[in-house]
Image (cartoon, rainbow, N blue to C red):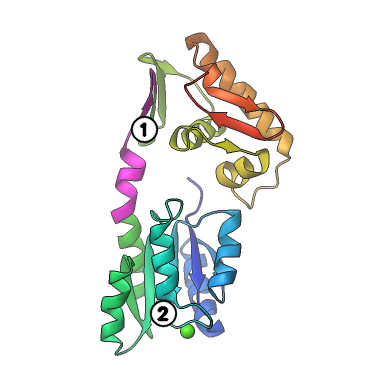
Amino acid sequence: MSAKSILIVEDEQPIREMVGFALGRAGYELREAGDVTEAYEVMADRLPDLILLDWMLPGASGIEMARRLKKDELTQHIPIIMLTARGEEEDKVAGLDSGADDYITKPFSPRELLARIKAVLRRVAPEEEDETIAVDGLVLDPASHRVSANEEPLKIGPTEFRLLEFFMTHPERVYSREQLLDRVWGRSAYVEERTVDVHILRLRKALAPHEFDHMIQTVRGAGYRFSNRE
Ligand code: CA
């Protein structure tokens, strides 16, 4: 599994630095934004696994952003931890009302923050990681990293597995090569777009004996789509 990415939306530089240091040491990938507009710019590249969201921000507030995130189908699954100042008891209630999953009061220690992050990710992850995904006779089990076609085990490489997992959890949508690189390989990977084609080819080859290769569809001029329709 690649490192979980966490987005912090916070206008106070010292807090961002402290959090960045603590999360980096714990193996998370941190991305930063100073306000809501910047946060959406950062998220346009790739959605984070969790958002640390400051309550008081210049411009739109953290609460407004939390409400907006939870209303949008694309982002509503992302857990949010609100950062609040000491004594803002009413804010905490409003924060949780807005859809935040947890809150932490400033000043907080790195250890306290890491414990909260782990707890929230644990709460969210089980369904995400344990549930098998089935489309017709094609079954992918993220927990055991196994794929089967019509109950016969399929041998596929780790990249093909991740690619197939992404496709099966995002069906009926076209993704460009660039988007697939971001979402499957991760932004830090320096891979050419042609690499995507190579792995698509391998994936189709693995699925072909069971006649599932038509599910990985080329959309001319746009990219690739997973679908069980012709
Ligand atoms: Ca602030």
Marker disc for residue 55 = 2
Q: Is residue 108 visible?
A: no
Residue 113 in percent (x, y) is at 37, 72
Residue 54 falls in image quadrant = bottom left
Residue 75, magenta (yes or no) = no
Q: Nearer the viewer, mark 2 or mark 1?
A: 2
- Name the residue at the top extreme: 209
- Distance Cα–Cα, label 2 vs label 1: 39 Å
- Type of the residue with mark 2: Trp
Residue 131 in percent (x, y) is at 31, 36
* Residue density around tag 1, few if under 14, some if 14–19, many if 20 or more, within 10 Å: few
Tell me: is circle 2 under 8 Å from ligand 1: yes
Badge 2 vs badge 1, beta-carbon distance below 8 Å: no
Q: Which residue is mark 1?
A: 144
Highlighted range, magenta: 123-138
> Image check: 23 left or right of 177?
left
* Residue density around tag 2, few if under 14, some if 14–19, many if 20 or more, within 10 Å: many
Q: Is residue 203 above or below residue 81?
A: above
